[in-house]
Image: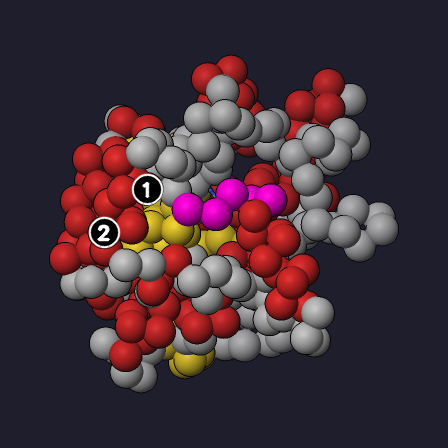
Amino acid sequence: MPPVFRFAPSPNGLLHLGHAYSALLNLDRARETGGRLLLRIEDIDATRCRPEYEAAIDEDLTWLGIAWETPVRRQSEHLSDYRAALEKLSALGLVYPAFESRAGIALLVAAREADGPWPRDPDGAPLYPGDAKWLPLGERDRLIASGAPYALRLDMAAACRRVAGLGWNELGEGPDGQRGAVPARPEAWGDVILARKETPTSYHLSVVVDDALQDVSEVVRGQDLFHATSVHRLLQVLLDLPEPAYRHHRLICDEMGRKLSKSGRSTGLRELRVAGANPAGIRRLVGLG
Ligand code: GLU
């Protein structure tokens, strides 16, 4: 079977040089290995994703000389796949509803920090500080029946008890030079959100379900997702999904050394194109020569 690669942008803004680098690396790997290249549209967040951004992704990638297989998988069209995975995790007793709002969580963290620093995840966000895991079942049912909003969280401690020796094969490089056999540390993320009342999935859940359903064999993506791979490996083992290889790549930064954002003007592919750049020039700009 030929290797399978995917570029998986979220249509919540215009692509910039960082996306171009990631997409071109996927293209080059597919060419080098005689592999297949897929485009996946990660449009779960209905509040931020827009069809016009998806159209812009198609246009910008085509301009760069990138072709992909069709049909394109659009996550919003496959919610039942994610729901099935969530039900499997629930049946293992690893999912619980948590009813705190974002503001409520911030208050809980502030209260815990009165006694010293509260742990943060690898992205710098405080770990879930609440006690929803221990809510009596009757109380859970009562809150759900009352229509209260909730997030479905993974019971990380229980999940980690079910797996041993978790890790992955890093073909690229982590932010601290990690390569080869990397041990996974999903516990560093605490009880991550797997879904919400209105949305039966989260980034972590849909990415592992899709990579498996699409037979992705090598995940080529930015180092900003290196630590999230620990959660992805845990979910793959819990859901009995195959393990891809991972190739995390350096991030393209602005002149201040900051990771590019979708709103950053001067590094947008559109702006560069309008200013006269050509695809070979974009390759050179991202260091692909
Ligand atoms: N959709 C994610 C993003 O745009 C990428 C997901 C992935 O490559 O795993 O950052």
Mark 1, residue position: 143
Callout 2 crowding tier (Cα within 10 Å): few <14, some 14–19, many ≥20: few
Please identify the dominant SS of the magenta region. Answer: loop
Left or right side of 103 for 183? left
Res. 14 image quadrant: top right
Callout 1 crowding tier (Cα within 10 Å): few <14, some 14–19, many ≥20: some
Q: Is residue 264 above or below residue 7?
A: above
Report the coloring of the rendering: secondary structure
Between 67 and 230, the one lying in front of the other is 230
Q: Which residues are magenta?
A: 99-103
Badge 1 amino acid:
Leu
Between 269 and 159, the one lying in front of the other is 159
Find the residue positioned furthest to the bottom: 165
Between 279 and 168, the one lying in front of the other is 168
Residue 52 image offset from top left, x and y in percent: 51, 15
Badge 2 amino acid:
Gly
Residue 222 shows up from this direction: yes
Q: Is residue 37 above or below residue 288?
A: above
Mark 2, residue position: 138
Residue 278 shows up from this direction: no
Res. 150 image quadrant: top left
* Mark 1 or mark 2: whose residue is earlier in sequence: 2
Residue at x 76% of width, y 29% of height: 265
Asked whether mark 2 lies closer than 8 Å to ligand 1, one says no
Left or right side of 140 for 120? right
Res. 230 image quadrant: bottom left
Residue at x 23% of width, y 76% of height: 162
Residue 132 image offset from top left, x and y in percent: 39, 58
Q: In the rendered structure, does residue 266 fall within the stretch colored magenta?
A: no
Q: Secondary structure at mark 2?
A: helix
